[in-house]
């Protein structure tokens, strides 16, 4: 069954899709890529689907390759299958897209064992387990990275199959590439910090605090020896100390929130 998410479009997407026999779920206004994906996940849960395959509506994916993604999921070989543009040579990909996608994919892979080559592909298949456990919360384009990072946390298996993309005359994205990349980058950083706040915020905070203390000691020594305050050193001490304390406070607070959320989720699971 084909399900189309009409994300507040102003054209005839809904009418055309319905006439062609698709099930259409609509948003009253444009909520973003992530919200559309979440709606599709909810619909798949409602239908108790045996598998979910997502495909972008920009015409760049080849629908003939759908069985290639679904087969490993149906056979139980993986919970998520990603259609990768980089397993096989694909010269159609613009250079700026190629390097941008690889950079964002490297960040989203992190130190995980299940590394993939194309973390920004919207051409994916999901198993019933993945459908049940994944609930994208990011509204924008960062949802692609969020899904993969959350899947690794939940122990879902991720694999890739090669696909081809058609970029000729199909630059239909309404997103500026720079804004798109920054949106995804912001999502990845947010998720990484939420996962290990004490490391990614606490450690830099301690370093900043130590630097601030160093400038403070330097300022006091000069004042003791020469009876004068070096304004630049004093301001540097103040700035680094405040930034360090803020980062440490934020890390501890975020850590407490994350632990509390995890505890509540584990209690609800029983």
Image: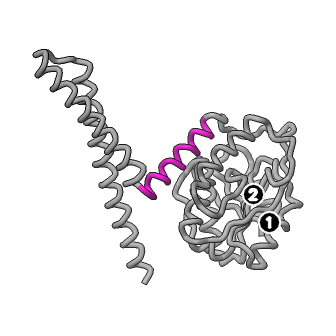
Q: Is residue 133 left or right of residue 84?
A: left
On the image, numbered disc 1 is attached to which residue? 69
Extreme bottom residue here?
270
Protein image colouring: one colour
| Image quadrant assignment for residue 69 | bottom right
Taking depth in this image into account, of 100 and 26 the one nearest to the observer is 100
Q: Main secondary structure of the magenta part?
A: helix
Taking depth in this image into account, of 2 and 268 the one nearest to the observer is 268
Segment tinted magenta in the rendering? 179-196
| Image quadrant assignment for residue 213 | top left
> Is residue 187 a member of the stretch shown in magenta?
yes
Disc 2 packing (10 Å; few <14; some 14–19; many ≥20) = many
Q: Is the C-beta separation of discs 2 and 1 under 8 Å? A: yes
From this view, report whether residue 258 is shown above or below residue 94: below
Q: Residue 175, how many percent across, how many down? A: 66, 38
Taking depth in this image into account, of 8 and 150 the one nearest to the observer is 150
């Amino acid at each position: 069954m084909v399900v189309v998410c009409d994300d507040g479009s102003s054209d005839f997407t809904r009418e055309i899709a319905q006439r062609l026999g698709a099930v259409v779920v609509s948003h009253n206004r444009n909520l973003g890529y992530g919200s559309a994906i979440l709606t599709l996940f909810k619909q798949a849960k409602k239908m108790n689907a045996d598998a979910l395959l997502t495909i972008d509506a920009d015409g760049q994916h080849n629908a003939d390759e759908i069985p290639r993604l679904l087969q490993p999921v149906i056979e139980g070989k993986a919970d998520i299958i990603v259609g990768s543009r980089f397993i096989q040579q694909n010269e159609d990909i613009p250079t700026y897209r190629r390097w941008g996608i690889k950079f964002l994919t490297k960040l989203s892979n992190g130190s995980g064992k299940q590394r993939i080559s194309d973390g920004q592909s919207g051409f994916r298949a999901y198993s019933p387990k993945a459908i049940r456990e994944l609930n994208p919360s990011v509204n924008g384009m960062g949802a692609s990275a969020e899904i993969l990072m959350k899947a690794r946390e939940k122990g879902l298996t991720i694999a890739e199959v090669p696909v081809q993309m058609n970029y000729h005359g199909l630059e239909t994205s309404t997103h500026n590439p720079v804004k798109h990349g920054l949106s995804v980058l912001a999502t990845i950083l947010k998720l990484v910090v939420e996962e290990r706040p004490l490391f990614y915020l606490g450690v830099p905070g301690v370093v900043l605090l130590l630097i601030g203390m160093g400038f403070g000691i330097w300022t006091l020594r000069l004042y003791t020896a020469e009876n004068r305050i070096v304004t630049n050193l004093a301001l540097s001490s103040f700035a680094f100390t405040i930034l360090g304390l803020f980062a440490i406070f934020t890390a501890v607070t975020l850590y407490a929130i994350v632990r509390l959320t995890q505890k509540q989720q584990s209690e609800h699971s029983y």
